[in-house]
Amino acid sequence: MRLFTAFRWFFRILFKGDAAFAELPGAAPKPVFSGSAEPAVQLLGLFQKEGRLLDFLNEDIGSYGDAEVGAAVRDIHRGCRRVLEKHFELRPVLEETEGAAVTLPEDFDRSAVELYGDAGGEGPRNGTVRHRGWYAEEAKLPTIPESADPKVAAPAQVEVGS
């Protein structure tokens, strides 16, 4: 009997995939996940969760000393950097270092490079790199349940039983 049951489940899973598990007696329905409809809000939530960035930016820091702000920024920087490392594959737009001379071809990508100074004329342009820029090779935002409100950047936290 067990061998027959094993074969039956093997073929159910083979042909139905994960849907076969929904046929198990007492099986709870699997939550449905999808890409976020509000990826900007989701990114804010990640920065808040790991680095408490929203709390920091909404705080009036005028009454704190430089040493206190500096100490807080180290933790925020560390957490926000973890988000970037985990969810994004970044590379510089330009390989040259800041301050280096660069020659841009006539057909350079104007969405990737902004010109400053005397930007008129045609042909290759010579200049100095002021910022290398960032290009996101890949973004890997986590999926969220369909039932979640996509506009909640960070849920409120309530401690109970205290």
Image (tube, rainbow, N blue to C red):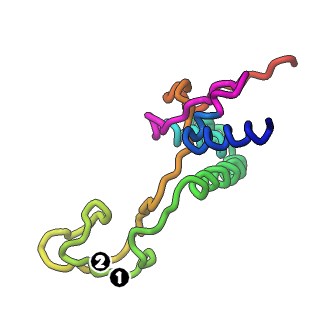
Depth order, front residue of 144/40: 144
In magenta stretch: residue 142: no
Q: Position of residue 104 (x, y in %)?
A: 26, 77
Q: Is residue 151 above or below residue 44?
A: above
Q: Which mark is residue 113?
A: none
Q: Residue at x 19, y 72 (%)?
A: 107
Q: Quadrant of residue 157?
A: top right
Q: Which corner quadrant holds the C terminus?
A: top right
Decide: few, some or many residues near mark 1? Use Cα within 10 Å; few <14, some 14-19, many ≥20: few
> What amino acid type should be assigned to the residue bearing mark 2?
Gly
Instruction: Label the magenta part by its dominant secondary structure.
Output: loop
Q: Secondary structure at mark 2?
A: strand
Q: Residue at x 48, y 39 (%)?
A: 35
Judge whether residue 53 can be spotted in this image.
Answer: no
Q: Position of residue 73 (x, y in %)?
A: 65, 50
Q: Position of residue 27 (x, y in %)?
A: 70, 25
Q: Position of residue 100 (x, y in %)?
A: 40, 81
Q: Residue at x 50, y 29 (%)?
A: 150
Q: Residue at x 41, y 64 (%)?
A: 133
Judge whether residue 14 can be spotted in this image.
Answer: yes
Q: Is residue 99 above or below residue 139?
A: below
Q: Which corner quadrant holds the N terminus?
A: top right
Label 1 close to label 2 by CB (< 8 Å): yes
Residue bearing mark 2: 127
Depth order, front residue of 153/142: 142
Q: Tell me which label, 1 or 2, sits earlier in the chain.
A: 1
> What amino acid type should be assigned to the residue bearing mark 1?
Ala
Decide: few, some or many residues near mark 2? Use Cα within 10 Å; few <14, some 14-19, many ≥20: some
Residue bearing mark 1: 101
Q: Secondary structure at mark 1?
A: strand
Start-end of magenta stretch: 21-40
